[in-house]
Image: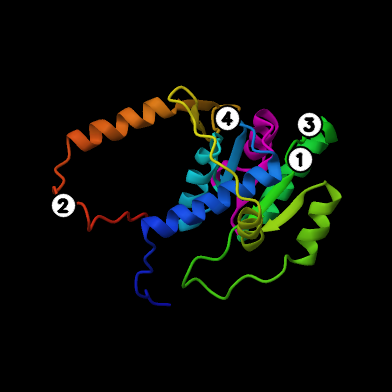
Amino acid sequence: GSFGEYQWISYQDSMKQIDMIGSGIAQLTGGHKGDFGAIFSINTPEWLLTQHALWRQGMCVVPLYSTFGLEALSYILSETELRLAVVNADLLPDICQAAETVIKNNGREALKLQYVVRMSRPLGMGEPLGPFPEAITERARAIGLNLVTWEELLSIGTQHPCPPCLPTPEDLHSLMYTSGTMGKPKGVMLTHRAFTLTADKSWVHTVFPDDKSNEVHMSY
């Protein structure tokens, strides 16, 4: 394939989507401040939007990576007791297998995961996704997982808007796990204060123009 044109999204449109995603998550999970929400995906615009939507609801982001392996993924699911995971379509079998492993090792009551949201396919990366594959649907049903499409999440958020539940500086911003190569994965707890200070110092030591009207955010 070949690279296409950049697809731009304004800050205003981003905020609208963040509001819809956050409201949808709150409707699904009850929107408890301090809960964990996982993102299991390659780097996409949906990754960034989901991250901000979780923070909007005062939730802590738990990034998951395919390089973790089955044992580490199942351990993280069990330890965090997270109820929601937003997952890239290609990684649905992995999250199902990790959930199955939690049940196999610790019993059904040990799995708190309830909702798995499938991200839409990024612009320019193939055809839009259709219904969930039957094999994934049956597999999820067998272990009590509710599968939700990205479009369904946005629709839920649109129909059930809710106010934000913003975090305090001392609330958890993210729980970053090590790969577990030297034993069980270890979660590093990072607060919003720590990230804010980092951003502030980065701003101080970087030269930005006074006119910020043309600033854009690019993520690779």
Badge nearest the viewer, 3 or 1 = 3
Q: Is residue 25 above or below residue 77?
A: below
Count neighbours of disc 1 (C-alpha within 10 A) and say few if under 14, some if 14 to 19, many if 20 or more.
many
Asked whether, in this view, residue 192 is left or right of residue 147, the answer is left
Asked whether, in this view, residue 141 is left or right of residue 95, the answer is right
Closer to the chain start, of discs 2 and 1, is 1
Q: Nearer the viewer, residue 162 or 152?
A: 162
- The residue that appears at 74% across and 43% down in the rendered structure is 114
Q: Nearer the viewer, residue 147 or 108?
A: 147
Closer to the chain start, of discs 2 and 3, is 3
Count neighbours of disc 2 (C-alpha within 10 A) and say few if under 14, some if 14 to 19, many if 20 or more.
few
Mark 1 lies on a secondary structure that is helix
Mark 4 lies on a secondary structure that is loop
Q: Is any atom of residue 44 visible in this view?
A: no
Furthest residue to the top?
A: 170
Closer to the chain start, of discs 4 and 2, is 4
Closer to the chain start, of discs 3 and 4, is 3
Whether tag 2 and tag 1 are in contact, CB under 8 A, the answer is: no
Q: Is residue 195 above or below residue 3?
A: above
Label 2 to label 1: alpha-carbon separation:
53 Å
Count neighbours of disc 4 (C-alpha within 10 A) and say few if under 14, some if 14 to 19, many if 20 or more.
some
Q: Which mark is residue 211?
A: 2
Badge nearest the viewer, 2 or 3 = 2
Whether tag 1 and tag 4 are in contact, CB under 8 A, the answer is: no
Q: Residue at label 4?
A: 185
Q: Residue at label 3?
A: 110
Residue type beneath disc 2: Asp
Badge nearest the viewer, 3 or 4 = 3
Residue type beneath disc 3: Ala
Label 4 to label 2: alpha-carbon separation:
44 Å
